[in-house]
Image: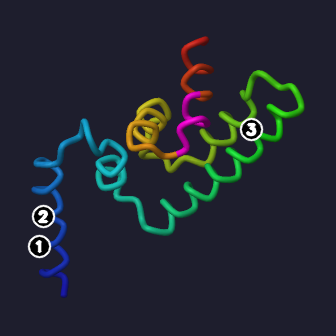
Amino acid sequence: MEERLANLEFYIELLLKQMDRSKYPWDYLIMRGKLSRREVQALYQLCEDLSKEMEKQKAEGFVTFSPLLIQFRQALPPDLPLEETIAALRTQGHYVPLMDAFQKLIKKK
């Protein structure tokens, strides 16, 4: 069983090298960071919640979403760099309005 697992990990490393990172940067980060399905689903749920909160805040007249960015940063697995993760999610079409807002906040700093 250990040998099969080691082979699978080796095959994944090979596939990662061949992956088109410009088209699939988020998928690449998931694999490079060795994130579990559960971790990815939790991150998607967080983004869903933050997106709803952002829309609610926009309706109330808020124009900056720094607390949402802080919450996102704190929830990221340690192996995922903040800016690269935001760009990767946006590139693959995940939570684009939220990621756009986060990118604007980061550029202001």
Q: Position of residue 31 (x, y in %)?
A: 30, 55
* Residue at image coords 58%, 61%: 42
Q: Amino acid at mark 1?
A: Asn
Instruction: From the top left corner, tell me how far across and down residue 1 is, in percent.
Output: 19, 88
For mark 1, what is the residue? 7
Circles 2 and 1, Cβ within 8 Å, touching? The answer is yes
Q: Spatial distance from mark 2 to mark 1, Cα to Cα?
A: 5 Å
Query: Which comes sooner in the sequence, label 1 or label 3?
Result: 1
Rendered image quadrant of residue 109: top right
Q: In the picture provided, is 106 more to the left or to the right than 51?
A: left
Image quadrant assignment for residue 64: top right
| Chain part drawn in magenta | 95-100
Amino acid type at image mark 2: Phe
Q: Is residue 32 above or below residue 81?
A: below
Exactly how many numbered labels are in the figure? 3
Q: Nearer the viewer, residue 2 or 19?
A: 19
Q: Secondary structure at mark 1?
A: helix
State the residue position of label 3. Answer: 54
What residue is pinned by disc 2?
10
Foreground mark, 1 or 3? Answer: 3
Q: Residues within 10 Å of mark 2 (few under 14, many from 20)?
A: few
